[in-house]
């Protein structure tokens, strides 16, 4: 039987506190998945970040916005708190901050806390953030302890319900981050200044290419240290999640770098860490190929395919790109070691994609579904049926596609800065509980 799952970022969970979190609604979502035989919950990065979940401030610190006030109340760390009117948009407004300070004052350090704060990278993040905010290092250590504790308890509960978590590993930190401050030798710099920015060449999403506001790695320095900087992060992530999606796998083979101040049109590819890194990584008996999923979309060269296939990584497939509507077939139909999506967080929703098609191609899409015995009158259900029937071993559907929503509910529009990016959220689970049965 094909393994199935649902894509929903933590911030998109229903919440009466402005943003989804690790609290009661997350547990309810796990229950819904379990009751409908969904094996996976795929999330976006939960790292401390800036603007985007992929703008990482630390590879080890978690996003403190995801701390549950309800769980703080259950622990007796806060007495009561106000609520925010229900909305289908996240409110990034520091609403929770005063309650975090209250909880910090009422917290008594225990042995688990003392053990947790010994982690070097968490101390680095607490110092980094303290410098930015003026708040004490101890306060930020406390927040990281609570976030980590709440997350691991949620993961443990999900696993008890036979639901596994697919986490997401961003490829780079931001320029101004804990990583670049404490590990500058791992990034390309000259005289203390960054020389290149990460990004992509012109592509489907952006005719000028993309710039990611992130540095690129100093591959030679990382190799010289036997890849320890990257390997430690993989080891840590596989403690946080059951499986890890590796963002921008192309970058491990060859990555794109753009001279500072230039556009993506002036960037170029250079060799990445490649086989040497993965050979060293997989010497750890706790790291299994089956627990790694690679994002190998976009401009992929033959060398990247050989690197991918050498290790047998499970890869991603996006139906919006795989279905050839001119010839009415799936270009990737025979692939089995694949995780198939109608679209991921950077794509149109199914209905959003459908609306971009002219009348002829709308009919061609319906004909494609009919030829594959996916007959439902609703195109989103037809696509879900196809995901269930195709040869890919895993299928993941976003909540927006389960609900049949259009692009006003998409998660992100790549290459743009907008309040609509990374802000869509559910107001409740009522419709989702019914419509998940169609998958």
Image: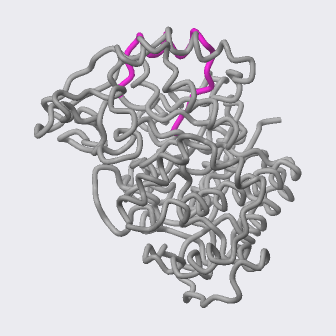
Q: Nearer the viewer, residue 49 or 310?
A: 49
Query: Looking at the image, what colour scheme do you see?
Result: one colour
| Residue drawn at x 54%, y 78% as measured from the top left | 96
Residue 405 drawn at (x, y percent):
53, 66
Judge whether residue 315 is colored magenta: yes
Question: Which residue appears at 48% of the width and 34% of the height?
Answer: 322
Judging depth in this view, the residue of 398 and 58 nearest the camera is: 58
Residue drawn at (49%, 68%) of the image: 424
17 inside magenta stretch:
no
Name the residue: 66% across, 76% down.
Answer: 69
**Residue 85 x %, y %:** 55, 89
Seen in the picture, residue 405 relative to 388 is either above or below; the reply is below
> Is the N terminus in the top left, top right, bottom left or bottom right quadrant?
top right
Give the quarter of the image for residue 333. Answer: top right
Residue 103, horizontal then vertical, whole percent: 64, 76
Q: Which residues are magenta?
A: 299-318
Query: In the displayed structure, would residue 169 be above or below residue 417?
Result: above
């Amino acid at each position: 039987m094909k393994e199935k799952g649902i894509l929903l970022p933590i911030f998109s969970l229903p919440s009466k506190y402005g943003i989804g979190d690790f609290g009661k609604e997350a547990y309810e979502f796990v229950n819904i998945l379990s009751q409908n035989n969904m094996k996976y919950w795929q999330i976006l990065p939960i790292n401390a970040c800036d603007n985007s979940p992929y703008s990482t401030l630390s590879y080890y610190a978690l996003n403190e916005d995801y701390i549950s006030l309800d769980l703080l109340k259950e622990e007796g760390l806060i007495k009561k708190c106000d609520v925010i009117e229900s909305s289908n948009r996240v409110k990034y407004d520091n609403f929770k901050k005063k309650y975090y300070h209250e909880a910090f004052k009422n917290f008594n350090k225990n042995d688990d806390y003392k053990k947790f704060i010994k982690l070097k990278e968490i101390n680095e993040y607490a110092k980094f953030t303290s410098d930015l905010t003026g708040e004490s290092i101890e306060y930020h250590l406390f927040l990281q302890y609570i976030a980590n504790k709440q997350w691991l308890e949620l993961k443990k509960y999900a696993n008890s319900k036979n639901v596994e978590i697919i986490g997401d590993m961003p490829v780079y930190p931001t320029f101004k981050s804990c990583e670049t401050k404490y590990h500058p030798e791992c990034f390309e710099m000259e005289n203390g200044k960054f020389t290149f920015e990460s990004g992509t060449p012109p592509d489907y999403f952006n005719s000028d290419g993309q710039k990611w506001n992130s540095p690129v790695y100093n591959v030679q320095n990382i190799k010289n240290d036997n890849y320890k900087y990257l390997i430690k992060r993989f080891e840590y992530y596989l403690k946080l999640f059951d499986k890890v999606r590796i963002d921008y796998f192309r970058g491990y083979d060859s990555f794109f770098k753009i001279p500072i101040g230039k556009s993506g049109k002036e960037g170029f590819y250079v060799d990445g860490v490649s086989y040497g890194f993965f050979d060293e990584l997989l010497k750890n008996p706790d790291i299994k190929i089956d627990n790694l999923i690679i994002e190998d979309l976009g401009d992929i060269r033959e060398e990247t395919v050989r690197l991918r296939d050498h290790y047998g990584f499970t890869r991603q497939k996006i139906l919006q790109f795989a279905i050839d509507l001119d010839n009415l077939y799936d270009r990737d139909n025979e692939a089995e070691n694949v995780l198939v999506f109608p679209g991921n967080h950077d794509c149109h929703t199914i209905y959003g994609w459908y609306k971009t098609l002219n009348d002829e191609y709308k009919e061609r899409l319906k004909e494609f579904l009919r030829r594959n015995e996916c007959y439902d009158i609703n195109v989103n259900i037809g696509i879900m049926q196809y995901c269930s029937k195709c040869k890919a071993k895993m299928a993941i559907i976003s909540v927006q596609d389960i609900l049949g929503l259009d692009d006003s509910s998409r998660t992100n529009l790549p290459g743009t800065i907008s309040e609509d990016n990374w802000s869509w959220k559910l107001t409740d689970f009522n419709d989702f509980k019914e419509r998940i049965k169609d998958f």
